Amino acid sequence: MLHNIKDQQDHLLVDLAENIVAQTTIPITHHAALRAGFAGYPVNPRWCVTKFQAWKTGQKWQEALQKGEMIIRSQDQMLVSNNQEQEIRKEESRSTECFKFSVWAKQLVSHQLSIISH
């Protein structure tokens, strides 16, 4: 069930629940506490402070998911901030707009060149 994959920024990919993953810098040793908080289990009184913080993070992510502040991205089932996903969509639309403009500009230039060459 554990997808502990390191990337360039020391983020780990952790399975929070079935078909839900998230990126985190929380150490692997605390991922069980993170999942417990996300699943709504109570805190273990024997946990150290850092495990409690991981549990609390999982609990906050679940609350944010329920409030719509976080979403599960459909293409990879990753839990992400709704604001982060909106920013990505804005960037994609901006790049699409630039592409549309550049195609339009190329068509205009080629049309003008054809007029000049006649």
Image (tube, rainbow, N blue to C red):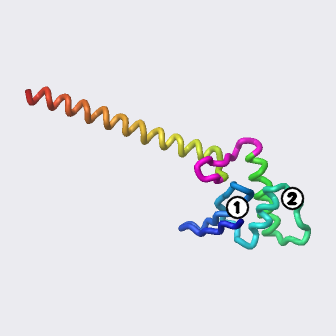
Q: Quadrant of the N terminus?
A: bottom right
Per the image, the residue denoted by label 2 is 41
The magenta stretch is: 66-78
* Residue 118 in the figure: left or right of residue 78: left
* Residue 106 in the figure: left or right of residue 75: left
Residue 74 shown in magenta = yes
Name which residue lies at 61% across and 65% down: 11
The first of marks 1 and 2 along the sequence is: 1
Instruction: Give the quadrant of residue 33.
Output: bottom right
* Residue 28 in the figure: left or right of residue 33: left
Question: Mark 2 is on which residue type?
Answer: Tyr
Above or below residue 77? Residue 100 is above
Q: Residues within 10 Å of mark 2 (few under 14, many from 20)?
A: few
Instruction: Give the quadrant of residue 85.
Output: top right
Per the image, the residue denoted by label 1 is 15
Circle on res. 82: none
Whole-percent x and y of residue 114?
Answer: 14, 30
Instruction: Give the quadrant of residue 45.
Output: bottom right
Q: Residues within 10 Å of mark 1 (few under 14, many from 20)?
A: many
Question: Magenta-highlighted stretch: main secondary structure?
Answer: loop
Name which residue lies at 42% across and 39% down: 96
Q: Residue furthest left?
A: 118
3D distance between C-alphas at marks 1 and 2: 16 Å
Above or below residue 109? Residue 79 is below
Dot 1: element: strand
Above or below residue 87? Residue 104 is above
Above or below residue 33? Residue 63 is above
Whole-percent x and y of residue 106?
Answer: 26, 36
Tell us which disc is closer to us: 1 or 2: 1
Dot 2: element: loop
Q: Quadrant of the C terminus?
A: top left
